[in-house]
Image (cartoon, rainbow, N blue to C red):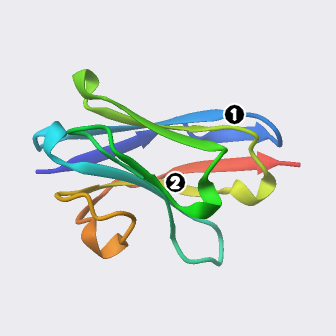
Amino acid sequence: EVTLVESGGGLVQAGGSLRLSCAVSGFTFDDYAVGWFRQAPGKEREGISVISTSDGTTYYADSMKGRFTISSDNAKNTVYLQMDSLRPEDTAIYYCAADKYFSGLDQKAFDSWGQGTQVTVSS
């Protein structure tokens, strides 16, 4: 069974940083792509970034470039999302998900999802 567990969310002041972690199990880690998504209250879920754990290729949504950095530690079966210069509008539930192929941020391609971690940015 494929399992993804997010952690690292919390409350942070505007301008601060957080690093989210996504621990994955149940599949061969370096055969998948793992992406980060978020859903703010009243809004649709949107893609942030995805990484190919086999070769480190990354892709970012245009609106997420510059303040978010995705990385992976294959020895720990974990993907990270470093978030800097956080803004109140970054408040959302952040999810990680796994895609058997590197399909960018097409959410339909991601068939396994974590439960999410709440990030709240205060002004």
Residue at 23% from the left image edge and 21% from the top image edge = 75
The residue where tag 2 is placed is: 94
Give the camera-side residue of 116 and 28: 28
Expressed as whole percent of the image width and height from the top left, the position of residue 56 reads 31, 38
Q: Residue furthest right?
A: 123
Please rate how many residues cluster around mark 1, counting C-alpha atoms within 10 Å: few if below 14, some from 14 to 19, many from 20.
some
Expressed as whole percent of the image width and height from the top left, the position of residue 50 reads 39, 52
Expressed as whole percent of the image width and height from the top left, the position of residue 93 reads 56, 57
Residue 30 numbered tag: none
Marks 2 & 1, CB-CB < 8 Å contact: no
Quarter of the rendering containing residue 103: bottom left
Q: From this view, report whether residue 78 is shown above or below residue 104.
A: above
Give the camera-side residue of 89 and 71: 71
Q: From this view, report whether residue 78 is shown above or below residue 89.
A: above
In screen coordinates, is 74 left or right of 60?
left
Residue type pointed to by label 1: Ser
Q: Secondary structure under badge 2?
A: strand
Residue at 83% from the left image edge and 43% from the top image edge = 14
Please rate how many residues cluster around mark 2, counting C-alpha atoms within 10 Å: few if below 14, some from 14 to 19, many from 20.
many
Q: Secondary structure under badge 1?
A: loop
Q: Residue furthest top?
A: 75
The tally of labels here is 2
Foreground: disc 2 or disc 1: 1
Residue type pointed to by label 2: Tyr
In screen coordinates, is 108 left or right of 63?
left
Expressed as whole percent of the image width and height from the top left, the position of residue 29 reads 17, 38
The residue where tag 1 is placed is: 17
In screen coordinates, is 13 left or right of 80?
right
Residue at 64% from the left image edge and 62% from the top image edge = 63
Indicate which disc, 2 or 1, sits on the residue closer to the N terminus. 1
Residue at 63% from the left image edge and 67% from the top image edge = 40
Alpha carbons under labels 2 and 1: distance apart? 14 Å
